[in-house]
């Protein structure tokens, strides 16, 4: 099952010293809430950028989604689901003023706030400089529709 | 009502390839807690910087305040207020050891921790690269006094 | 008591315009949970980098640890401990699926999520551009073993 697609028209800057790369990842999850490991794709983009030393920003472009770093362990992912549902329950919908606008996703705004909008990862010797268990995730909290993640790489 | 003022003595670097801009935004809210949309001001600073491709860091310089990205919808803002007050209530003041120092703002330190200190936003083609509903907010959790936000732009 | 040691083999890049510095800080706390002020060490690294204008990324490389900015006040630190233990209690261990893997640190993953993985701090005029009370902390939530923090500085 293909979970995300990628723009073909990425941007790449290449001056004498500074290089940049900009790319959007597209997601359309089948469930309302889902966690997707995007580390391999971010590694590919670091390679593509040609940056040897720099920073890689990865952020959700939608305010009911998250990009965060944690463990790729299914039990922990279920723990996150249970914990977030306890801290910011989806129902009753009437518990949130935001849902008076016709939305039903107020809890998604709060859940994403706990998990965070973005990560900034170092690039060292042309690779993502991640710890042994660090994996980059897209966290969807109001899915079943198109969402994007922005990847911006700058460095030399 | 003018909610924030800006330093006139900003810093601007401009070498062959890398440009930087540093500026402080000043806030003095009339209420203890307040959310203020600062997106237009950050856009102005990106223009002023002349950076076409780069990163824009926006961070609270005070530890009972936040900079975060979410929706500019008043119902959601009230939901944030209710939710944060539930997760980290202001009272009773005696519930927090920090308040023994003579402060009454321990809850503000915790609320800001949930909302986050900073955002890093990509600059692409000389503009903030924000998703359709992403707006940048200053979140005040212990106001009625002068506070600052730092904006640092680097790129080319 | 020496709480952290530092790699001797750091990396330093120095081209015409962009400079980078990469260094790892090592921690091995005696207690499961501990907060350690690392601001002086980060200041030293900024000096060492020679960067005058830029960004400094400081991130935990382990997913049960945090790097965050807040106040260096012991009462507040105890408030953080009490608050995190309330939001994500260590026990009962059986409350978390992750602990079925043989770990007992599921709560540490959640606590670190609240506190955050990383901070990005501006460097202005060759110094960390911190507010009056901002101090950078390493937050350990599953200690008594070796952990690392990554410091990446880029700028000019």
Image (spheres, coloured by chain):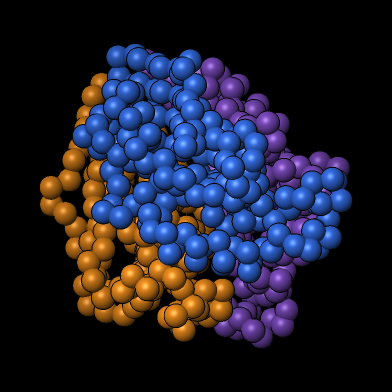
Chain colours: A purple, B orange, C blue
Q: In terms of image quadrants, where is residue B50?
A: top left
Q: Residue A111, position in %: x, y? A: 63, 64
Q: Which residue occupies 23% across, 48% down? A: B23
Q: Nearer the viewer, residue B53 or C74?
A: C74
Residue A70 visible, this orientation = yes
The percent position of residue C62, horizontal first and vertical second, equals: 62, 39
Q: Residue at x 59, y 51 (%)?
A: C33
Camera-side residue of B155 and B7: B7
The residue at the point 38 percent across, 35 percent down is C42
Decide if residue B156 is on the left or right side of residue A38: left
Give the percent coordinates (x, y) of residue C119.
Answer: 45, 45
Of residue A111 and residue B97, the one placed in the foreground of this image is B97
In front: B23, or B72?
B23
x%, y% of residue C76? 44, 63
Q: Is residue C93 left or right of residue B67?
A: right
The answer to whether C122 is drawn above or below residue A45 in the figure is: below
- Against B66, residue C20 (above or below) is above
Q: Residue at x 40, y 16 (%)?
A: C13
Is A63 rendered above or below residue C2? below
In this image, C135 relative to A67: left or right? left
Q: Quadrant of the C terminus of chain B?
A: top left
Extreme-front residue of the structure: C1
Kindly indicate the quadrant of the structure image that contains residue B21.
Answer: top left
Quadrant, the N terminus of chain B: bottom left
The answer to whether one can see residue B142 in this image is no
């Amino acid at each position: 099952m293909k979970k995300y697609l990628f723009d073909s028209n990425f941007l790449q800057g290449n001056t004498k010293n500074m290089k940049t790369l900009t790319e959007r990842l597209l997601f359309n999850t089948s469930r309302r809430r889902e966690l997707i490991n995007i580390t391999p794709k971010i590694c590919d983009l670091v390679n593509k950028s040609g940056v040897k030393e720099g920073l890689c920003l990865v952020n959700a472009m939608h305010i009911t989604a998250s990009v965060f770093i944690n463990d790729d362990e299914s039990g922990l992912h279920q723990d996150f689901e249970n914990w977030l549902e306890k801290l910011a329950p989806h129902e009753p919908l009437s518990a949130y003023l935001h849902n008076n606008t016709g939305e039903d996703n107020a809890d998604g705004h709060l859940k994403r706030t706990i998990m965070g909008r973005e990560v900034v990862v170092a690039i060292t010797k042309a690779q993502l400089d991640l710890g042994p268990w660090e994996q980059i995730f897209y966290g969807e909290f109001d899915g079943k529709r198109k969402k994007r993640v922005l990847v911006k790489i700058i460095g030399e």
